């Protein structure tokens, strides 16, 4: 049971006001670095979801007619307001999610940046276009349901909301209940920015209740979801009844293709960072390291040393790069995959089951397997923890085949001393993004997956298109 001084979050945000939810279920918040209960949140239910949708529906007609200048000003006000809460958000990201300080700084600046980037994008976006003899205008879809996970809570809320606002849509946001403290801070900031009641509503509740109520509701025109592939499929099925427009940003099993000419002193640290970013809880994590057999021993030795040097522990220690898993469930899931790896015959080079020494929370030992075959479970399924698998290959042809032999297609990495050669390999990889000798991100470029990594794209003009519907005018006076 929580002790007296735990944080109590007992309101949700509907129609421009913080209100007591109709739902009465209480959910404990934890510090994943210790496992201790740090707060309690009262969850919204289906009735709250319906009230939020109704508020967003009422706000839509007026908001959809606002011009660019008004929306740009709102996005900047929101960015300023979130930036003002940087300190609070940083503490919450560390204490509620377990992000190491080195990562947490990005996680609190990113939501501000996505709001500003949406404002910039909106400034340049052509809502009205001439196509042949027709005039085509891009019209906002209506009420958008934005369903977000816990691995970058503020970034997902602000990113999806910023795009909805830029498009002229109103929104109902359903964040993960595990991130309620971060959500509370973001909601207060967005509220302080001042906007029309109902324009955005934030209802923290369970996915199978509040999330399902949103995806099934006839007054919701659009769903933007980030999370697991299994839930994404359930959402797509639920959304089919009312033919909602659906954007899904799902899982990955990203390959890092290490070519035989790579400078390993550069490539190995990059490959390890790609695998363990966000404590391994990243859809874009490069979890399959494809290594040429001709240099396997060298790669294994360097990768083992690099993984053993990864600090998993106190998130407030600047030397820490891998924090705890977000929850006990997630910790157990990663442990299970490590066991499966051993059972299926992968060779453990570093880490393994259990906790790193001196930790008590939901920490995983940064783990490296080698002799992994691409048909093993740990090479096929998303683990979502700091577990990297070395998969040996013979030649470049085989490397490309292994890279593409996955149900996923979100991101890939190619590492080589020869940029032109790396580019040729990158061209053959089926993934939404391919990064060459880099961990770069560009918010103007589309982000999303091929195959079962999702449907549609976020960011940039493709992201904005996804909240709009083209309307064609033909004939006299056009
Ligand atoms: P989910 O996909 O279940 O959760 C993501 C969001 O969807 C949460 O807000 C969740 O609510 C909500 N949700 C769950 N069920 C429904 C539903 N039927 N209708 C509408 N919304 C729903 O992920 P988990 O948190 O269970 O994580 C499990 C695995 O998913 C991870 O190990 C990882 O592999 C993957 N994942 C991928 C992410 C990515 O960035 N692509 C992010 C997070 C997870 P609630 O929290 O109440 O369940």
Image (cartoon, rainbow, N blue to C red):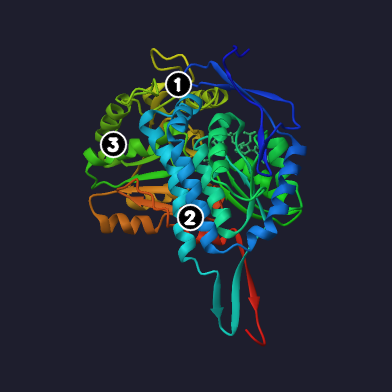
Question: Is ligand 1 closer than 8 angstroms to the Cβ of mark 1?
Answer: no
Q: Please give the name of the residue rendered at 50% of the width and 35% of the height, measured from the top-left corner.
A: 151
Instruction: Name the element at disc 2.
Output: helix
Q: Vertically, is 183 above or below 444?
A: above
**Which residue is disc 2 drawn over?**
118
**Which residue is disc 1 drawn over?**
363
Q: Vertically, is 467 above or below 173?
A: below
Residue 293 pos. (x, y %): 30, 40
Q: How busy is the neighbourhood of tag 1: few (under 14 within 10 Å), some, or many (20 plus)?
A: many
Decide which of 369, 247 is in the foreground and name it. 247
Q: Please give the name of the residue rendered at 69% of the width and 50% of the height, measured from the top-left corner.
A: 56
Q: Tell me whether the residue at label 3 lies in contact with that at label 2, contact meaning CB atoms closer than 8 angstroms.
A: no
Question: Is ligand 1 closer than 8 angstroms to the Cβ of mark 2?
Answer: no
Distance between the alpha carbons at the discs numbered 1 and 3: 21 Å
Q: Please give the name of the residue rendered at 52% of the width and 17% of the height, measured from the top-left corner.
A: 35
Q: Nearer the viewer, mark 1 or mark 2?
A: 2
Instruction: Report which quarter residue 49 is drawn in.
Output: top right
**Direction from residue 369 to residue 377 in the image, left or right:** right
Ligand 1: quadrant of the figure: top right
Instruction: Name the element at disc 1.
Output: loop
Tell me which numbered mark, 3 or 2, is placed earlier along the sequence.
2
Decide which of 368, 464 is in the foreground and name it. 464
Q: Please give the name of the residue rendered at 77% of the width and 38% of the height, measured from the top-left corner.
A: 47
Q: Tell me whether the residue at label 1 lies in contact with that at label 2, contact meaning CB atoms closer than 8 angstroms.
A: no
Question: Is ligand 1 closer than 8 angstroms to the Cβ of mark 3?
Answer: no
Instruction: Report which quarter residue 130 is drawn in.
Output: bottom right
Whether residue 435 appears in this view of the structure is yes
**Which residue is disc 3 drawn over?**
269
């Amino acid at each position: 049971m929580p002790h007296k001084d735990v944080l109590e979050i007992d309101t949700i945000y509907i129609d421009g006001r913080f209100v007591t939810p109709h739902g009465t279920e209480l959910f404990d918040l934890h510090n994943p670095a210790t496992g201790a209960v740090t707060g309690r949140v009262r969850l919204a239910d289906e009735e709250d979801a319906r009230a939020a949708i109704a508020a967003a529906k009422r706000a839509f007609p007026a908001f959809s007619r606002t011009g660019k200048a008004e929306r740009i000003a709102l996005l900047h006000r929101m960015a300023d307001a979130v930036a003002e809460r940087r300190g609070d958000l940083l503490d919450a990201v560390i204490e509620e999610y377990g992000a190491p300080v080195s990562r947490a700084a990005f996680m609190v600046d990113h939501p501000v940046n996505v709001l500003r980037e949406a404002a910039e994008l909106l400034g340049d976006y052509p809502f009205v276009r001439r196509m042949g003899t027709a005039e085509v205008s891009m019209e906002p879809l209506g009420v958008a349901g934005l369903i977000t996970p816990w691995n970058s809570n503020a970034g997902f809320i602000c990113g999806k909301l910023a795009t909805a606002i830029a498009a002229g849509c109103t929104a109902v946001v359903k964040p993960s209940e595990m991130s309620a403290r971060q959500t509370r801070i973001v909601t207060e900031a967005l509220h302080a920015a001042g906007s029309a009641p109902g324009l955005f509503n934030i209802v923290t509740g369970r996915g199978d209740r509040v999330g399902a109520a949103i995806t099934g509701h006839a007054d919701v025109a659009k769903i933007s979801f980030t999370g697991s592939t299994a839930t994404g499929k359930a959402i797509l099925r639920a959304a089919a009844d009312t033919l909602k427009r659906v954007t899904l940003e799902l899982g990955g099993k990203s390959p890092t293709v290490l070519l035989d000419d790579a400078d390993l002193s550069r490539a190995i640290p990059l490959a390890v960072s790609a695998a363990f970013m966000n404590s391994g809880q990243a859809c874009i994590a490069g979890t399959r390291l494809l290594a040429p057999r001709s240099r396997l021993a060298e790669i294994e030795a360097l990768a083992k040393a690099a993984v053993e040097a990864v600090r998993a522990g106190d998130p407030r220690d600047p030397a820490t790069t891998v924090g705890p898993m977000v929850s006990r469930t997630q910790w157990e899931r990663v442990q299970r995959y490590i066991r499966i790896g051993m059972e299926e015959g992968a060779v453990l080079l570093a880490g393994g089951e259990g906790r790193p020494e001196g930790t008590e929370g939901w920490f995983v030992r940064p783990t490296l397997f080698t002799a992994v075959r691409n048909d093993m479970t740990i090479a096929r399924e998303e683990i979502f923890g700091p577990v990297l698998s070395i998969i040996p290959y013979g030649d470049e042809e085989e490397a490309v085949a292994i890279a593409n032999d996955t149900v996923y297609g979100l991101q890939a990495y190619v590492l080589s001393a020869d940029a032109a050669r790396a580019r040729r390999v990158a061209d053959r990889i089926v993934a939404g993004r391919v990064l060459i000798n880099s961990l770069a991100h560009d918010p103007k470029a589309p982000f999303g997956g091929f195959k079962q990594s999702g449907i549609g794209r976020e960011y940039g003009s493709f992201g904005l298109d996804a909240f709009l519907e083209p309307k064609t005018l033909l004939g006299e006076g056009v």
